[in-house]
Amino acid sequence: MNEKNKPILEVKGLKTHFTTKRGVSKAVDGIDFTLHKGETLGIVGESGCGKSMTSLSILRLIPSPPGKIAGGSVLFKGKDLVTMPEGEMREIRGNEISMIFQEPMTSLNPVIPVGEQIAEAIRLHQKLGKKAAWEKSVEMLRLVGIPSPEKRAKQEPFQLSGGMRQRVMIAMALACTPEVLIADEPTTALDVTIQSQILELIKDLQTKIGMGVIMITHDLGVVAETCDKVAVMYAGNIVEYASTEQIFANPKHPYTQGLLDSLPKINEDVDELKTIEGSIPSPYNMPSGCRFASRCPYKEEMCTSHKPELIEQNDGVKVRCWKYTDEWTGTIKKEEVV
Amino acid sequence: MLMFILRRILQIVPVIIGVTFVVFFIMQLVPGDPAVLLAGEGASKEAIEAVREQLGLNQPLYIQYFEYLMNVFKGDLGVSLKNSQPVLDEILVRLPITIELAFFSIIITVVLGMTAGIISAVKPYSLTDVSVMLVALLGISLPSFWLGLMLMYFFSVKLQILPVAGWDSLLHVILPAVTLGAGGAAIVARMTRSSMLEVIRQDYIRTARAKGLREHIIIYKHALRNALIPVITVVGLQFGALLGGTVLVESIFAINGLGRMIVDAIRTRDLPMVQGGVLFASLIFVVVNLFVDVFYRIFNKRIELN
C-alpha cells in the first residue's frame, strides 16, 4: 500500500437527524465514503440533499439542538470523531481537519481584523507567540495571493472584496497545514474568473501539503476540474460513488444521468435545458422504497416498495439502484440501462 | 479616529445652542410676567419695572436671548432668587455628587446587565436563563421610588448594614446607585441576551468553532464584540433616563445633587436655578452621547460619519 492509498478519513453509516416540531428530519441517512491522502473527493447533489450537513457532521459542527449525529462513525486516522471527547475534537478542528464555508461574505467576523482571525488559529494549534503567529498569518495571506498582505491583514472583512474574503477563508483553513480540507461550495458565491483562481489555488496547495480534500458542490464543472472521486447524494443517501472519469463517461444511476443530461452541451443548440421532473422528497416523510423513484423514468413496482442498497459493480462503481441487481424485473434489460 | 472625534465635537455646538434656546424659553413659558415673579410677590410697580429694566426684559426677545447666550458663555447663569448666590457656584458644588451617583449607577447598569444577559444567552431556555430573565422583568417593572424605599427598609432599617441616607462615604453610594441602575440593568440584560442569541447563530461563529477555539473565546471574543453594538446604543439611551432618575433618587436618599437642586428650585420657583440645572443636565447628556458614539466607532469601524 503506497502513501497515497492510505485512507485518512473513513465515514461509515453516518446519520445526522434533526428533531423538530414537524418530526424527525433525516438530513444525512447512512453515508459511507473513504478519503485518501492527497485525494479529492467530490460530493454533489442538489440543495437540501444533505451534503453540507455531511461535512458539518464530520467536524461535529451541527447546530445542536435540534441536530444530532444519530449513528455511524467517522474514523480519522483510526480514531472515531463521533465519540471523541469535545476537548480532543477541538484540537482536530482547524488543525488537522479544517473547513472552508460557502458564504465568504458572512463567514468572517465583521469586527476582527482578518490577520488576527487567521493568527488566532495559529496561536492555538501551533503554540506560536503573538508576533510569530501574526507573521505566519501575513505569510498565509501572501500564499493565497492577496496583494500587500501586511496592509490587508490589519483590515476588517468589510474592507475586502468577496474573492479576497474567500482567499482569507482559505488562508485560515490552511494555516495549520491540515490533513483534510472540507470545502463546502467554496466558489458558489464568486464570479467565474475568481472561481477558477480559487480552485487552482486549492489544487496548488493540495499538491504542496498533500492533504485530502472533500469538495462539496452542486457544480459538475467544479467536480470535473478538481475531483478524483465523486459521491452523488440524493435525499440523504449516496446514490452513486465512482471515479470522476466513470461518472462523466458512464453515469449509472438515473439521477446522475439526469444531472449530467441537464448540463448544456457546447455542440448542441437547444432552446430549453433538460430538467429532472419533480422535486426532492420531504426529509420528514421519506418514501419507503427508492427515494428517487417518484422522479425516475425507469421506475418499476419494486422501486417504490423496497429501498435498494449501494452495491459495487464489476467496474468498481457503487450504485444504489435496482436496475443493477439480479432482482431487477423491469422491461429495460440490465445491460441496456448502461 | 481623531478626525472622527473632532468632527463629532463640532457637531455638539449647534446642539448646545439648541439647548440654551430651550432653557431660555422656559422663562418665557412660565405663566405670568417673569419680572413680577422675579421681583417677588407684593413688590411695588416701581420695583417690578426696575427688575424689568435690570434684566433687559423690556428688550425684544431675540436680544434677550442673545444676551442670555453671551452670559452663559461667560459663565454667568444669574443669581438664585432664594439666597442671591450665583447659580453657577451652587451647580458646581452639586454637579460632582450627581456625576458620581450617575457613574456608579451606569456601572451597575452595564456590569450587572451585561453579565446577566451573557449568562442567559449561553444557555437559552435553561432554568438559569428563565430565572435571570424573570428577575430582569421585575427590574424593569419596579418603580425606582418603591425599590429605593424597599432597599432602604431591608438594608438600612432591618439589617442595618448600610446608611439610610446622605452622601459621605462609598457605603452611602451603594443603595442609591443600585436603585438608579436596576431598571437600566434589566433592560441591558434583555438586550444583551437577544443580541447574543442573534449573533451566536451567525456564520462567523460557526467559522470560529471550526477553528477549534474554546467556547469562552467564541463567546467573549467573537460573539460579544458584535453583540455589544446594539447594547451600547441602549446604554446611551439609558443614561438619559438615568439622569431623570437622579431627581427621584436624590430626593429619596436626601442627596444634595443636581437633581434634588432642580426639584427644590422648581418648588420654590427659583427660576434661574432651574434654568442652570436643566442646562447642565443637558450638557451631561450631550457629552455622554459623544462618548457613546466614540465607543460605537471603536467597536464597529464600519460606521462612517458623513
Image (spheres, coloured by chain):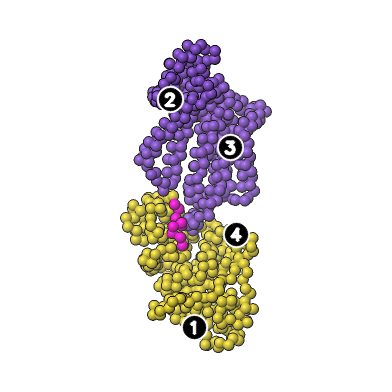
Chain colours: A yellow, B purple
- x and y percent of residue A194 in the render? 37, 64
Label 1 SS: loop
Q: Is the residue under label 3 in contact with that under label 1 (CB below 8 Å)?
A: no
How far separated are the C-alphas under marks 2 and 3? 41 Å
How far separated are the C-alphas under marks 1 and 3? 73 Å
Stretch in magenta: A102-110
**Residue type at tag 3:** Gly
**Residue type at tag 1:** Asp
Label 4 SS: loop
Q: Earlier in the sequence, mark 2 or mark 3?
A: 2
Is residue A149 within the magenta segment?
Answer: no
Q: Which residue is mark 1?
A: A315
Q: Quadrant of residue A69?
A: bottom right
Q: Earlier in the sequence, mark 1 or mark 4?
A: 4
Front in this rendered view, residue B249 or B37: B37
**Residue type at tag 2:** Leu
**Residue type at tag 4:** Pro
Circle 2 crowding by C-alpha within 10 Å: few under 14, some 14–19, many from 20: few
The mark found on residue A66 in the picture is 4
Q: Residue at x 38, y 51 (%)?
A: A155
Which of label 1 and label 2 is nearer to you?
2
Which of label 3 and label 4 is nearer to you?
3
How far separated are the C-alphas under marks 4 and 2? 69 Å
